[in-house]
Image (tube, grey):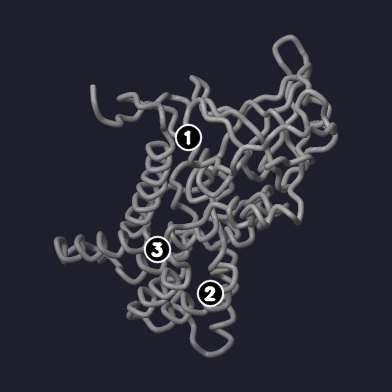
Amino acid sequence: MSDPTLFDAGKPGGKTNDEASSIVALGEMTDGQEGDLFALLADKQTLTTKDGKPYYRVTFRDARRDVSFPIWGDAPLADACRDQWQVGGFYKLRALYRDTNYGPQLDIRRIRPVEDADTADGFSPSMCQPSSRFDSAEMFADLVELAGGIEDKPLRTLVLDLLETHQVELLAWPAAKTNHHAFYGGYLEHVRNVARNAVYLAKQYQELYPDMTPPLDVDVATAGAILHDIGKLRELRLTPAGADYTASGSMIGHILQGRDMVRETAALQAEAGEPLSPERLLRLEHVIVSHQRLPEWGSPKPPMTPEALIVHFADDCDAKFQMMLTVLGGDTSGAAMTGRRNVLGQQLYLGGE
């Protein structure tokens, strides 16, 4: 079947009557495979080589894979990339997929924006939007159930109020722009994992050390785990290309904005006659501001309470585990070890010798 609208990579904007390939999914392509595919242009950066020559680094994405690669300034597609390719736009490409030492690459033969007629070939924006493997409504219900187990009534009310007030956003929000859980529903997937693990650890340590002074507060650990990233609702915004930073996200970040959201809700509760004790509020705020532990990671203070320590490690473990899951799942080399060019910056073992 011919597709006369595909742009010729050798003549940007030109047309070709070459026979089109069948549609393939970017996330399913293997080394050396060529085909027609739909993808979202998730990122485009203008950079320079060591010699000062401009080039572009682009990232095309579908629901299962991101592929980032350069478009050199003297390449046939360079002008079209600079002037026509729009971040957040959906495209139909004919491309060769390659696994290289620098990660996955695409050699683009032809490219054009997606058209209405492409729906007949199966195009849908959702096919280019990574999303959680778990149902968002179920994950949200699980968080509400965990919050319902908080014994301190004002603290329970505060957590439930924040969840219910922001339910619509939470059902779709990613946990980050990049690195971990950076997909629709990623926030809930990450926070549910962190909360489940933190509650388990808090209860185990409370049982092991009942004479701890002051006692480990399972309620604060639970609330802190559920709310540790709540500021990301102000730090991030959704775009067709995924999450991006708001102005306040870039200038303030999610940690301080999360503390602000907790303080604002606590103040409203106090006005309504259900005040949270000052010490519990302080401990909850500390969990939020310390959960990333290091200043270079965004935390102004390290964990200074057992609840904060538990939430920090539950958070860090889940983030790192999801990064490892992504690296292992995205490697199609067939080698025993992955490369080092990944979000973890290290090799991982895939099996074999």
Residue 252 position (above or below residue 16): below
Residue 160 position (above or below residue 27): below
Q: Quadrant of residue 280?
A: bottom left
Query: For this view, does 60 lie left or right of residue 151?
Result: right
The secondary structure type at the circle numbered 2 is helix
Q: Quadrant of residue 237?
A: bottom right
The secondary structure type at the circle numbered 1 is loop
Name the N-terminal-most of marks 1 and 3.
3
Rendered location of residue 5, percent (x, y): 79, 41
Residue type indicated by callout 2: Leu
Residue type indicated by callout 3: Arg
Label 1 vs label 3: CA separation?
A: 22 Å
Q: Nearer the viewer, residue 312 or 58?
A: 58
Q: Quadrant of the N terminus?
A: top right
Give the residue drawn at x 67%, y 33%: 58
Q: Quadrant of residue 219?
A: bottom left
| Disc assigned to residue 249 | none
Name the N-terminal-most of marks 3 and 2.
2
In the rendered image, which residue does mark 1 sit on? 343
Q: Residue furthest front?
A: 1
The answer to whether the residues at label 1 and label 3 have Cβ atoms under 8 Å apart is: no
Q: Quadrant of the C terminus?
A: top left
The answer to whether the residues at label 1 and label 2 have Cβ atoms under 8 Å apart is: no
In the rendered image, which residue does mark 2 sit on? 162
Query: For this view, does 40 lie left or right of residue 182?
Result: right
Rendered location of residue 248, percent (x, y): 70, 54
Rendered location of residue 182, percent (x, y): 53, 50
